[in-house]
Amino acid sequence: MTLFNPEKIQEAQKAQLELLQKISGKIFESVEQLTQLQFKNLREASGEQLQNLRSQLSVTDPQDISKLQASLTQPGAQAERLMELNREVYELISSTHADIAKLAESQAHATAQQTQEMIEALSKNAPAGAEPAVAMLKSALESVGSTYESVQQAAKQASKMAEEGIAAAAATATATATGKATTGAAKPKASAKK
């Protein structure tokens, strides 16, 4: 009987290849979605610019020009559109990250289980006097496993904190942009009354 089962090693290699294929597929899918999102926003911005140009060309009265300029310079709408794009990009990146993390976590669990099975086989077939070495190997693997779990928990907490920070920054930026747009829109009206 051999210590290392060639079929198990081949299964592990196939699982690693399958994981790589799934991760690559998820990355390509996300890049495709990001590209579609960018094209959608480019199309919308181009259509808006063409509409603005049509509006400018159709103005004949000088009073209509000032109204048109006021309607074209609305930073609140532009800021909201930009924040929406940023939110969609962030959601896409976050979703991709979570999916890849799940794939990697499941593969890490399977690898840990296979390693544990290998250690059990080693301990059953170890020659007399090798018990201390096997015990040391088991202890080292347990230590690696607990360290991996600690690192994984820390990474999850850091990811959660980053998501909360980005969400808070987005909310603040939206509120600030909306507030400036409201303030900016109110100022011309006040100066127009004078």
Image (spheres, rainbow, N blue to C red):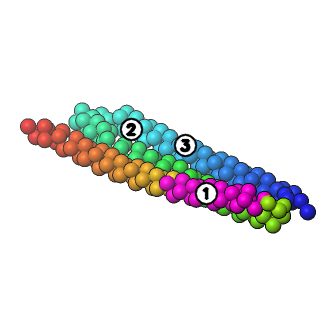
Is there CB contact under 8 Å for labels 1 and 2?
A: no
Q: Tell me the residue at 47%/39% (across/down).
A: 46
* Residue 74 drawn at (x, y percent): 30, 42
Name the residue at 70% across, 57% down: 137
Q: Where is residue 109 in the image (x, y as percent from the top left)?
A: 66, 61
Q: Is residue 146 magenta?
A: yes
The magenta span reads 130-154
Classify 10 Å Cα crowding around label 2: few (below 14), some (14-19), many (20 and above). some
What residue did someone put label 3 on? 39
**Circle number at residue 143:** 1
Q: Label 2 is placed on what type of residue?
A: Asn
Question: 2 above or below 27?
Answer: below
Amino acid type of disc 1? Answer: Ser
Closer to us: mark 1 or mark 2? 1
What type of secondary structure mainly makes up the magenta span? Answer: helix
Circle 1 SS class:
helix
**Mark found first going from the N terminus, 3 or 2:** 3
Position of 56 with respect to 70 (left or right) is right
Residue wearing tag 2:
52
Q: How far from the left and from the top, in percent, is residue 158? A: 46, 52
Quadrant placement of the C terminus: top left
